[in-house]
Image (cartoon, rainbow, N blue to C red):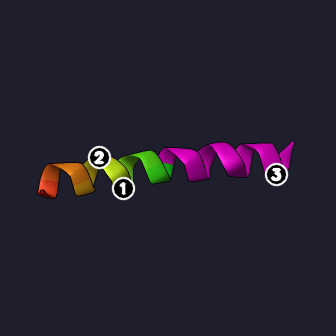
Amino acid sequence: RESMEKGEKTEHLVKEAVELLVKSR
């Protein structure tokens, strides 16, 4: 369970980072 929650949090952070990168271009 914990590992899955961590994975979801990481995915969310990655998506946000990608969006910021796309916007900055």
Taking the spot 36% from the left edge, 55% from the top edge, the residue there is: 17
Q: Which residues are magenta?
A: 1-12
**Rendered position, 8 above or below 6:** above
Residue 1 or residue 18, whichever sits in front? 18
Amino acid of disc 2: Glu
Residue position for label 2: 19
Determine whether label 2 and label 3 are within 8 Å by CB: no
The residue tagged with tag 1: helix, strand or loop?
A: helix
**Rendered position, 12 above or below 25:** above
Marks 1/3: CA distance?
A: 21 Å
Q: Position of residue 20 (x, y in %)?
A: 25, 53
**Rendered position, 5 above or below 21:** above
Q: Position of residue 25 (x, y in %)?
A: 12, 57
Taking the spot 69% from the left edge, 49% from the top edge, the residue there is: 7
Tell me: 7 left or right of 19. Answer: right
The residue tagged with tag 3: helix, strand or loop?
A: helix
Q: Is-magenta flag for residue 11?
A: yes
Residue position for label 3: 3
Of all residues shown, which one is farthest toward the left? 25
Eye-nearest disc, 2 or 3: 2
Taking the spot 83% from the left edge, 49% from the top edge, the residue there is: 2
Q: Using the rendered view, name the quadrant where residue 1 is placed.
A: top right
Residue 22 or residue 20, whichever sits in front? 22
Dot 2 or dot 3: first in sequence order is 3
Amino acid of disc 3: Ser
Of all residues shown, which one is farthest toward the right? 1
Identify the disc placed on residue 17.
1
Q: Residues within 10 Å of mark 3 (few under 14, many from 20)?
A: few
Amino acid of disc 1: Ala
The residue tagged with tag 2: helix, strand or loop?
A: helix
Determine whether label 1 and label 2 are within 8 Å by CB: yes
